[in-house]
Amino acid sequence: GDSVTQMEGPVTLSEEAFLTINCTYTATGYPSLFWYVQYPGEGLQLLLKATKADDKGSNKGFEATYRKETTSFHLEKGSVQVSDSAVYFCALMSGGSNYKLTFGKGTLLTVNP
Amino acid sequence: KAGVTQTPRYLIKTRGQQVTLSCSPISGHRSVSWYQQTPGQGLQFLFEYFSETQRNKGNFPGRFSGRQFSNSRSEMNVSTLELGDSALYLCASSSHHQETQYFGPGTRLLVL
């Protein structure tokens, strides 16, 4: 079945540091890939997505590239801010009549001033 | 455009009771999905509805059920509550299958 593996953290960085959160997946067919972010006490917000191989999703300085050859979708940001502190989830949606997201376990990011 | 709304936001129940949670999707979205989030199991898919039909169901016992109305609003029901049902229940909507899912703020259920 489908699965997503992401580094569980927690990850603690200083402001303006470089961020990478690794995500790899197993899926049938050609899934769409997503990063969601969850701030304390809130639901999930879509951060970025990519729907086919070599696509790069980007938003708010975050980027991730769909790598089919390595089945990966690593999240990166060049300079993190305190306001980026949150839990980040990598997720996939397989093709066909699946209609569901499969999530990784989440990575807690804390950015210190 | 208003986002996904869920009511109530917080709920406290006791074991053996039942509970109904409500979700209103983004206007124009016809697909509604439900997820359970717990510290131990993470985010798990419950079920998905489109045009009042359940198209997919996750691996949850029959105590968990749902439905969707003609206006796309959805409800999920949990009967005979157990302590392990304590969780954040998230609803998400999308315009049609395979499109991006947008999440509501969730309903936090505590079972005592």
Image (tube, coloured by chain):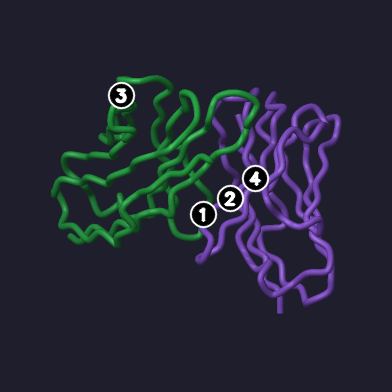
Residue A42, disc? 1
Going from N to C along the chain, the mark reached first, 2 or 4, is 4
**Residues tagged 1 and 3 counted as in contact (Cβ below 8 A):** no
Q: Position of residue A109 (x, y in %)?
A: 30, 56
Q: Secondary structure at mark 1?
A: loop
Between marks 2 and 1, how big is the CA–CA gap? 5 Å
Which color was chain A given? Answer: green
Chain whose colour in the figure is purple: B
Q: Is residue A36 left or right of residue A78?
A: right
Q: Which mark is residue B105?
A: 2
At 50% from the left edge and 60% from the top edge, which residue is drawn?
A41
Residue receiving disc 4: B91
Q: Residues within 10 Å of mark 1 (few under 14, many from 20)?
A: some
- How crowded pointer 3 is (Cα within 10 Å; few <14, some 14-19, many 20+) is rated as some
The kind of residue on which mark 2 rests is Pro
Q: Residues within 10 Å of mark 4 (few under 14, many from 20)?
A: many
Q: Secondary structure at mark 2?
A: loop
**Residues tagged by mark 2 and mark 1 found on one chain of the structure:** no
**Residue B64 placement: quadrant:** bottom right
Q: Secondary structure at mark 4?
A: strand
Q: Secondary structure at mark 3?
A: strand
Q: Quadrant of residue A70?
A: top left
